[in-house]
Image (cartoon, grey):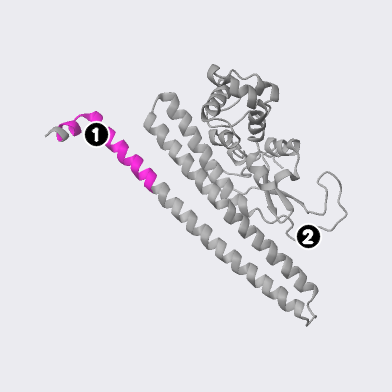
């Protein structure tokens, strides 16, 4: 209608995964080697300062990293491990969700195309969003489009499937509501780290790193609860579907299914309550962090202006 194509939402790479010193240490590297690997990747332009790895990085580039002399012997022994961690870091969050059900090439295809992923049971949901369309003026609210693909567990992802699609197969992207928001906030904080580092503002850099740590903690602790909610929804949906097929059946099986459905609803309610409490706790912690930063800024502002120094001395 407008003659132009769609622009799609630019999902931050932090949604899919980042490389961290902790990840390398968990896989058997010393802290020194982990630091040297991160530094060498940045030096070669293969990683940002926040751990976003070049999506086209190759094993050869990793093997050829200019590692500091003190860590070269260990790097020689653990090159394979380092390469695996670095390569998988590009989609490590997705792999934590889907495991070995997708190939590395399929994972990278998802990252390249900025696709959101969720699962329910063994079913997969793919989501992609356009940017705002038909927007009258910048900054105004406007509609957007969502495209989804459901891959049910009985179908192969690369072949046409003759099986009927189950209602709600793959869920409704419940994990992505919170995970995407946190990923965007993490990306903003990472940009603040880089900006503060470039101008030598150590206080602002430390503050931004604290924000990244807090947001990452919230994401890590929210994901298991989101899994519980998703599993409860799957259990409830499965029990309800089977109940419908036994609508006129007075047998004991119907009673058991009703109990299963009610049990799943209670689990979902309890998990939702715990997720809300967790979100509120981290919101308070973020407010406290921002308040501390504001206090420090006021302190240094007064200190630089001079009168505050006089007050301290009087």
Q: Position of residue 282 (x, y in %)?
A: 45, 51
Q: Quadrant of the C terminus?
A: top left
- Which residue shows up at 38% across the image and 28% down it? 201
Secondary structure mostly taken by the magenta-highlighted segment of the chain? helix
Residue under label 2, please give it.
Answer: 166
Q: Which mark is residue 302?
A: 1
Report whether residue 44 is seen: no
Question: Label 1: how many residues lie within 10 Å, few (<14), some (14-19) or many (20+)?
Answer: few
Q: Earlier in the sequence, mark 1 or mark 2?
A: 2
Tell me residue 124's x, y (percent). 73, 51
Q: Secondary structure at mark 1?
A: helix
Answer yes or no: is residue 309 visible.
yes
Is 8 one of the magenta-colored residues?
no
**Where residue 267 sits in the image (x, y, percent)?**
60, 66
Magenta residues span 288-311
In the image, 170: left or right of 34?
right
Residue 276 screen position, x and y as percent:
50, 58
Query: Please, is residue 124 above or below residue 298 in the view?
Result: below
Establish if 292 lies above or below 51: below
Single out the residue that lies furthest toward the left. Answer: 314
């Amino acid at each position: 209608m407008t003659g132009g194509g769609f622009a799609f939402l630019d999902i931050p790479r932090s949604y899919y995964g980042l490389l961290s010193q902790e990840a390398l240490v968990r896989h058997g590297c010393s802290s020194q080697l982990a630091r040297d690997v991160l530094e060498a990747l940045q030096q070669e332009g293969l990683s940002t300062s926040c751990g976003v790895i070049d999506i086209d990085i190759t094993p050869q580039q990793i093997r050829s990293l200019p590692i500091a002399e003190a860590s070269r012997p260990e790097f020689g022994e653990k090159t394979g491990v380092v390469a695996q961690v670095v390569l998988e870091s590009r989609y490590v969050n997705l792999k934590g969700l889907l495991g070995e059900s997708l190939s590395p090439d399929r994972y990278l295809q998802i990252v390249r195309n900025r696709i959101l992923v969720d699962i329910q049971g063994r079913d997969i949901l793919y989501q992609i969003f356009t940017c705002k369309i038909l927007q009258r003026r910048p900054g105004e609210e406007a509609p957007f489009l969502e495209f989804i693909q459901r891959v049910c567990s009985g179908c192969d992802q690369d072949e046409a499937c003759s099986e009927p699609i189950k209602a709600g197969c793959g869920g409704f992207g419940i994990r992505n509501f919170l995970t995407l928001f946190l990923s965007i906030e993490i990306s903003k904080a990472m940009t603040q780290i880089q900006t503060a580092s470039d101008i030598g503002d150590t206080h602002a850099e430390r503050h931004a790193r604290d924000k990244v740590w807090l947001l990452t903690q919230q994401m890590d602790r929210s994901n298991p609860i989101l899994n519980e909610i998703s599993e409860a929804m799957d259990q409830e949906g499965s029990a309800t579907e089977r109940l419908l097929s036994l609508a006129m059946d007075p047998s004991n099986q119907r009673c058991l299914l009703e109990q299963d459905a009610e049990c799943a609803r209670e689990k979902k309610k309890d998990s939702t309550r715990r997720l809300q409490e967790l979100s509120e706790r981290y919101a308070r912690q973020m407010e406290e962090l921002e308040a501390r930063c504001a206090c420090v800024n006021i302190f240094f502002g007064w200190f630089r202006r001079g009168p505050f120094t006089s007050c301290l001395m009087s």
